[in-house]
Image (cartoon, grey):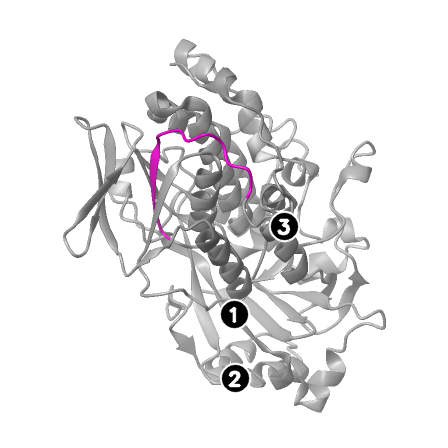
Amino acid sequence: MSSNHSEQRPLTNGDRLSAKPERYPLTGISVLVVGAGVGGIMTALECWRNGHDVRILERSSGPVGTGDFFTIGFSAVKAFRNWPQLAKENEELAYDPWIAFYKHTGEMVLPPGPMSWDAGAAEVKDRPKRIYRHHRPKVYRMLLAQLERLGVQPEFGQRAIDYYEDSTTGKGGVVLDNGSRLEADVVVAADGLGTKSFSLVVGRKVAARSSGYAIFRTAYPVEYALADPQVAERFKLLDNGQSVNEIWMGPDMHMFVWRSKDLMSWLITHKDNGLATESWQDSTKIEDVLKYTATVPGWPEIMNRTIRTTPKDGIIDWKLMWRDPQPQWASPRGRVLQLGDAAHTFIPSSGNGATQAIEDAVSLATCLRLGGEDNVPDAVKVHVKLRYDRVSCCQKIGFANQETYHNADRAAAVTNASGLKPKHGSWIWKHDPEQYALENYEKVVHCLETGEEWMNTNIPPGYKPRPWSIDELSVLKEQGKPIELDGDWS
């Protein structure tokens, strides 16, 4: 193994008024990205910036403007520093709500306050000053516009049905539903939970399974909610103009409800009754949600009124699907690589799905540049080594957060925010995926060559990675035992 690490020239910030970043010299590496979601577009952007030749496919017939909210963590926001226009728009578009905690009966547990980030004494000055909560349609348009400014146009209506790699040509490939076959030095399967890449990557189909939960979710213009005087009174902005994201904790369920200046959003995580789907196009009736809330003891009428303000066909019952963490993200010859949800699923309470997909994109593009055209398979191996342990930890956080939210009585006994707020330790927000790849690429190459064990430092201090599964966590839940987080996750 070898790399082009020593041959790289420093990257400058370029013209900060330009919509394009400084680009590294062309590497000669061709990258075909399958899937134009957040992870896929960021992969295309970062690969372009790192000097690779990029092409991106998307199965949808055109840009998808559906979805509600997700958070982009500070470690992923760092990627925008190299994209002047994205950095500007991210600050303008992202919401920064305060957070409050309630029992499912409407009883306040902790009052509104700004999102706080775990930090040691020496890290306080560096911790994020705000949260970046995004409306998916807006941030999707933001990323898509940046891609188009580079002259890279997503090719819509291209559905992947199979993946392959050719040992003779040293290429990866994808088979489309129209029978055509496209190849590149690296094919990135960023096509979500339904990816067809598993047969090649792990040698068998690995179907996603239900996590046991689903989520009623919606976001709509706030005017609909404010038309009900009682809802308008209940969800007023604070005196300082700040909006509040309320987390309601109940018996094996939890809800996020948030009124911003322009949008109303609520999400209820509940036991999967078999009716949920994995489509933004399959709507659920308001009456079906109210049938569920009628089963939650002490559920307040004001929340039912809020649910009734949702526009017709505006609610999705989204099945939360899951695959256990698995370290094999790349095909045997390293020419096809899974990324984002295709490689690692997240439940929403992790607050990490989009963040880790963006980190994936930055890491992969950097590793390919450091490895160079002659070392693409090795670069892919290094990328996976750098990413797997960290992602597995972030996945586990989702279940730990959900465990807290689904035990309202225990939560009500907590008297400070540190016991309730989502876990965002400094090991999460301080991470810089590009810098981590730069600092560790050669070290991982050495371990791959010598067989030495590689130990990541982008995980909780003191944590020793080990395999885990959702079944293991389910047994702990049935036994009334908490999810153990060894090491320092704060």
Tell me which numbered mark, 1 or 2, is placed earlier along the sequence: 1
Quadrant assignment for the N terminus: top left
- According to the image, label 3 marks what residue? 87
Name the residue tied to disc 2.
Answer: 311
* The furthest residue to the top: 450
Residue at 43 percent of width and 78 percent of height: 284
Give the residue at x 34% y 25%: 377
Give the image quarter of residue 156. Answer: bottom left
Q: Amino acid at mark 1?
A: Arg
Q: Is residue 215 left or right of residue 95?
A: left
Viewer-side residue, 443 vs 12:
12
Q: Check whether the beta carbons of the residues at disc 3 and disc 1 lie within 8 A of each other.
A: no
**Mark 3 residue type:** Ala
Q: Horizontal placement of 204 versus 272: left or right?
A: left
Q: Quadrant of residue 449?
A: top left
Residues at marks 2 and 3, CA–CA distance in whole angstroms: 33 Å
Segment tinted magenta in the rendering: 21-35
Residue 229 position, x and y percent, is 71, 90
Image disc number at residue 217? 1
Q: Is residue 263 left or right of residue 45?
A: right
Task: Nearest to the eye among marks 2 and 3: give it.
Answer: 3
Residue 110 versus residue 261 in the image, above or below: above
Q: Residue furthest right?
A: 239
